[in-house]
Image: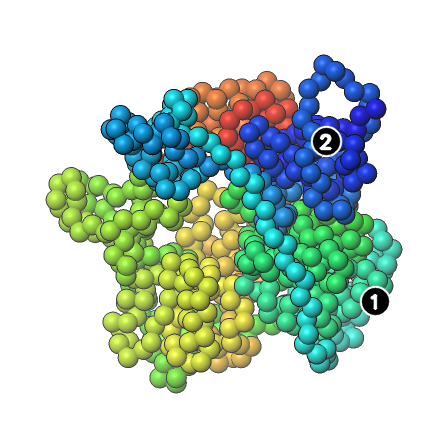
Amino acid sequence: MTLYADVVLPLPLSRAFSYTVPPELESQIKPGVRVLVPFGERLLTGFVIRSRAKKKREDLKLKAVCEVLGEAPFFSSRILSFTEKLSRYYFLPWGDILEAAVPPSFLIRSRALLVLSQKGLEALGQGLLSEEEKAIALLIKEKARRPRFLERKLSFMNAAAVLTRMEKKGLILARKEVRRVRRRARTENASPPAQLELDFSFDSSLRRPCDIIHQAIAGKKFTSFLVFGPGGRREAIYFELIKRTLHDGRRVLYLIPEISLSEALLDKLERRLGREAAVLHSGLSEKRRELEWQKVQEKRARVVVGSRSALFSPLDNLGLIILDEEQDESYRQQEGMAFDIRQGAWLRAKEEKAVLLMGSAMPSVESYYRAKKGGYLIDLGRERRKPQVILTDSRKDAAVVSRLLKKKIKERLDKKEPVLLFLNRRGYAAYLVCVRCGFVPKCKRCELALTYHKKDGKLVCHYCRYSRPSLEECPRCRSRLIAKRGPGIEAVAEDLKKTFPQSRVKILAADEAGRKREKEMILDDFLRGHVDILIGTQLLVHQVNLPPVSLVGILHPEMVLHLADFRSSQKAFQFISKALVFLPDEAAAEAVIQTSTPEHFSIREAARGSYQAFYAQEIRLRRLMGYPPFSCLAEVVLQGDNLRRLAEKARAFAARIRDSSEDIEIFGPSLASVARMKGSGRIQVGLRAKNKRKLDKVLRPVLEGIRFKRSVKIFD
């Protein structure tokens, strides 16, 4: 009998691969262990999902497992089951999910390095190489290089073909190298035990909802709850439930939307619970991520805090998953693996027979609807808003910053009080345009208008990060270029500096504070009173540790309403509501919302602080239009270099869906909102079904027949 192992590899392929197991490794093969296996010309780290003993078939030529990496299974059976269900739910390769779940240093793999052969060296010296071959030979003459590095470095388009030709001619040789990372030694924390901090936020009014949730945790059955209410009261419930869950001998996963919040939360947990928490997120250094992972795996941490990647932490005996700020769109991963952490948390809690506790003061419409319908909504009540919120119509005052808002800013500056302003548009202007011929500078890879950044004198693509020096005149007709389509955050800063020349104005956005150190310096200056006016994008909205200010200005929140997104009203409401959190609960505090659509219900109700009124109108529109939660939507984006061929494939894809079922509504094919990104053409097909089950039944078999690059986003 021969032992066979089915192995999932970190590749964009929706299948496992079978390998034979050498007799000396048979005792180590278990579901969840890491193995080093050959794949083509490479060696990759894979994960065993099952093994089986069968009589050896002589006609079946399979490669053998090279090595078992570590004695204990890396993933438990429950995590394997959960990740497989997540991959099926979002039509993602299982191996991609497992790869994302693992600290990079645990993934051993070989890589091909190209070196110049003796024959190639002689040909280079004798001048027998073509210009393209010579360019490659000079790059690898002194140091072996990876093919991908050479393709990026070389300017000519057919670099891959030239490399293949040179290898066939014997001018270059491919050398395999296995990269192994030395395991980090575990360092014990020699610091004294933490002085625990008493928590007085939990009052008698929270005892009943806390008892209901704890009873579900103790029952060891999957249940979910949505806690609707102010942040302070939600947090009081979270910490009480964490203490009770740990007392029961079970562990806790605490998910938050932003990496920047994790260290402060970890510190608070350690002050209240002791040194039993770990943090996991993609922003950690490779060394710290590995050490934190080991801390969890070795059961030295009973609570894990983190953002998206913490969902895959190796917690066993999991009793409670907390997902705070449930409404935050940061939970939906847009690039790479497109999936929603909220649905992922639901799937993991179900697999672990744990309780999923979601919390928000302005939950997503879908979650609030389901919680009300399912009877798992816990309403903690609302706090009455004391600050005054003023709506000003920018159609009547078209200045970059309205006269009313400038008047309010002056009043605060005279009192030496800082001001926060929010505008979710980076740069100085959306684009430049020629006044005569209409020419607009565009990204050469994405074919989108480049955003004008006046401060740096650059034109920048916010999709692929391509940038070039700014232009003053049109390259076609030599006429003047002017900034168009709405001011950006730089224009607001410029206007305020002219109006208040003595004030200290700073910008917090991904461009100006892209590096962690720069962002920390700006925030530190604000905390120390060295900034009078801080202007920020969505990045500033997430800095919850800032002290409250007496004046908040919100500029053009209606921009999001123009997006082709059924959730645009919800996003506008949430952006305003998050910005207003920075106001203290005082009658003297005030906010000014400068907008061209003050009558829109999402902006009006956000100004009033009425989630219920917003929800009532939004859910009525969703029902009328057949949007989630009353349907399931899928956005399938096909990508390729040749747009004509891509369009043919998209039409064929839509036809297969149409022929498979009459229950699926099809939109498109059409060019995606970003028709070309990073050099690849993009065509989208929208699908709508009554529920996810009906969509799966049709979409899954069609996607399995696709052999080109695609991504799928699910909204349900």
Residue 636: image x %, image y %?
53, 33
Q: Secondary structure at mark 2?
A: strand
- Residue farthest to the left? 478
Q: Quadrant of residue 163?
A: top left
Residue 369: image x %, image y %?
67, 50
Residue 597: image x %, image y %?
41, 55
Q: What residue did someone put label 2 on?
A: 6
Disc 2 residue type? Asp
Residue at x-position 43% and y-position 54%: 558
Residue at x-position 73% and y-position 55%: 297
Q: Secondary structure at mark 1?
A: helix
Gap between marks 1 and 2 measured at Cα:
39 Å
Decide which of 356, 562 is in the foreground and name it.
Answer: 356
Q: Which mark is residue 247?
A: 1
Decide which of 416, 138 is in the foreground and name it.
Answer: 138
Answer whether residue 704 is visible to the viewer in this image: yes
Residue 230: image x %, image y %?
64, 67
- Residue farthest to the right? 219
Decide which of 431, 390 is in the foreground and name it.
Answer: 431
Vertical comparison of 382 with 147: above or below: below
Label 1 neighbour load within 10 Å: few <14, some 14-19, many 20+: few
Answer whether residue 95 is visible to the viewer in this image: no
Vertical comparison of 627 with 609: above or below: above
